[in-house]
Image (spheres, helix red, strand yellow):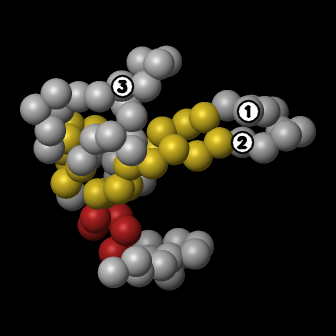
Amino acid sequence: MKIRCFCCGDDCIEVIMDIMKFDKFGVIDTEKNMFSNGIVGKISAGFGLIHDHNTFTLAICDSCLEQNKKRIINKKRYM
């Protein structure tokens, strides 16, 4: 299964597991799946916004990350 990049719109991020894992709402579980060619993560809106307490799953491919690395906030290396 491939996931569409939020920036470029290409289906370039691939799930590299035999069985897809979903959360209790039927959304791809970003913590229990492994992905190649990009990052898949969840973001959630805080209190007082239009999308109050909603959670969204976003995917960004590696090439878009490289092109936009100066605009990415809080980029950290963990290893």
Q: Say whether disc 1 or disc 3 marks the residue closer to the N-terminus.
A: 3
In-image side of 3 versus 47 (left or right): left
Tell me the crowding category of disc 1: few under 14, some 14 to 19, or many 20 or more residues within 10 angstroms, Cα based: few
Quadrant location of the N terminus in the rendered image: top left
Quadrant location of the C terminus in the rendered image: bottom left
- Residue type at mark 1? His
Q: Say whether disc 2 or disc 1 marks the residue closer to the N-terminus.
A: 2
In-image side of 68 versus 19 (left or right): right
- Residue at (36%, 25%) from the top-left corner? 22
Marks 2 and 1: CB-CB under 8 Å? yes
Residue bearing the label numbered 1: 53
- Cα separation between marks 3 and 2: 21 Å
- Residue at (20%, 41%) from the top-left corner? 15
Residue bearing the label numbered 3: 22
- Closer to us: mark 3 or mark 2? 3
Tell me the crowding category of disc 2: few under 14, some 14 to 19, or many 20 or more residues within 10 angstroms, Cα based: few
Q: Position of residue 20 (x, y in %)?
A: 23, 28
Q: Secondary structure at mark 1?
A: loop
Q: Secondary structure at mark 2?
A: loop
- Cα separation between marks 1 and 3: 19 Å
